Image (spheres, coloured by chain):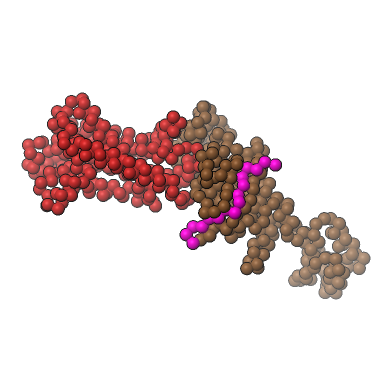
Amino acid sequence: MEIAIVVNELKKSFKKNDVLKGVTFTVERGKVFALLGSNGAGKTTIINILTTLIPADDGVATISGFDVAKHPDKVRKSISLTGQFAAVDDILTGRENLELIADLRHTSNSADIAADLLEKFGLTDAADRRAQTYSGGMRRRLDIAMSLIGNPPIIFLDEPTTGLDPEARNDMWQTIEALAASGTTIFLTTQYLEEADELADTIALLHEGKIVASGSAHELKKLVPGGLVELTFHDEKQLHGAIDILKKHFRVTAGENLTLIVEIGEGAKNLADLFIQLRDAHIEPVDFSQKLPTLDDVFFKVTRNKKEDK
Amino acid sequence: MGDFKDTWTMAKRSLRHIVRSPDTIITVVLTPIALLLLFVYVFGGALGQQTHGLSYVNFLTPGIIIMTVISGIAYAAFRLSNDIQKGIINRFRTMPVAPSSILGGQAASSTLSNLFSSLLVLAVAFAIGFRSSAGLIEWLIFAGLVTLFTLATTWMAIFFGLLAKTAEGAGSFSYILMLLIFISPSFVPTESMTSVLRGFANNQPLTPIVETMRSLLITGTPGDKAWLALAWCLGILAVFYAGSLRLYRNRTVSA
């Protein structure tokens, strides 16, 4: 396993506001890493430090083995940043924007590269119009296209889908998946759990200046009690009978309107056991539904635990 | 070499911005031309009595060129500040491009466009009677001095463009320079000013610059203040070039 990004005990304060209080994580080469957190959690601050825009107060960050504070020039050769607000030049056309970046990356055939990317991102028809006439989705596509020039091995995407309509968001997801398939390391931030779940190999939850949980979506979901089953009974007698039997094996919580929530954990066997025991006792629920854990559950559980710790 | 190429790439971008905003070109060129006509035809009759036998248009033209440059560099500050607000500068900052190229491109385009504006203003001055006895050498020295002055004040504009919180406020430093033109021997000889004002006017940086320009064009000699003019230009250039690069590196990103 090759490591693209190492972040160790990173700290940053703005005036008296401690934004990062010791952030630690690693990103594997060729993987999609999602930094998940609510608005103001410090996601952009981390991106700004990693992309050499601002210095950290304390801690170390390395990209492709180079310390971002000591060798920013070497770091800049292997990264590109697509910021939260499309940083395209409004006065230039789409084609000129691409050629500008290609020239700055010292490619030998800027015109070909621009034409190729315009085609790939469906901007050929708008190529010679000024970027200020583009829609939000087109600007985002142009922005990403500009980031790909020179094939930087590590791409930072700061909230790539914020403010996009569902269709444009879908396009963006496909673009990110295609990039990941080509072996590019992708560091993205998002406030959408669904997005992290969909795209990322590894997810890190940033909350109040620290990483409170990290792992694959699957691993994170294990942090919350496994599957919950909600049963509904015909009357009080049946409900209490079910509680008596099931509480020997599972955690049960009585809900409203003759319902019972049973934590059955992982696996189909537990679900089968549940129904066999009920049948043996001649109790028949009138309804049942299963609820699988989502990243939302993880997020709320982890952030709630943090509050209880205080 | 790579840095030079990058500077040119950035300059081309910036020149496109200039060419594509015709309203700013008009403002930059028309204001000094309007003032030139106003001073020559409205005030010139009275002011011309004070210029020791020099026709007022000949007396005035160097000062108007300085005014053209100063109104032009204000837009360089505006453009740079706008780039910062829009986040495009952050994109360049995360790329392997030298800071001196990113800012230098703005400096080069501003200098080129201001020289062009100055040429237009000079053409109008000729049309309304400006005449020079300067030879080719003096004209070349004059062009060199205007270029150096433009470059120096452009870096001042870049410094204030980096400092400004909003693009609209970025050009406001140029009002102070505009005021300095009026409190100098650009439009009237300083003898008629009150003693305090005259002391200031005779010793501020624009004075040797405008007097050297006038001397080159009218008498065909650099005059006795040429070295002082050169020193002021180089000093302003050095201070604001170094200051701008320092500010650029340390300025934390807002976006």
For chain B, the rendered hue is red
**Residue A14 part of the magenta segment:** yes
Q: Which picture quadrant has residue B69?
A: top left
Q: From the viewer's side, name the closer residue of A194 and B250.
A: B250
- Residue at 38 percent of width and 44 percent of height: B244
Give the quadrant of the N terminus of chain A: top right
**Residue B204 part of the magenta segment:** no
Please state the horizontal and vertical placement of residue A242, each as a whole percent of the image.
Answer: 85, 69
Q: Which picture quadrant has residue B15?
A: top left
Q: From the viewer's side, name the closer residue of B192 and B60.
A: B192
Please state the horizontal and vertical placement of residue A246, each as a whole percent of the image.
Answer: 85, 67
Q: Main secondary structure of the magenta part?
A: strand
A289 w.r.t. B4: above or below? below
Q: From the viewer's side, name the closer residue of A285 and B40.
A: B40
For chain A, the rendered hue is brown
Please state the horizontal and vertical placement of residue A113, each as a whole percent of the image.
Answer: 54, 30
B88 w.r.t. A245: above or below? above
- Residue at 17 percent of width and 42 percent of height: B186
Query: Image check: B208 left or right of B253?
Result: left
- Residue at 26 percent of width and 32 percent of height: B144
Give the quadrant of the C terminus of chain A: bottom right
Highlighted range, magenta: A1-16
Please state the horizontal and vertical placement of residue B243, each as a whole percent of the image.
Answer: 36, 45
Question: Can the viewer see residue B3?
Answer: yes
Q: Residue furthest top?
A: B136
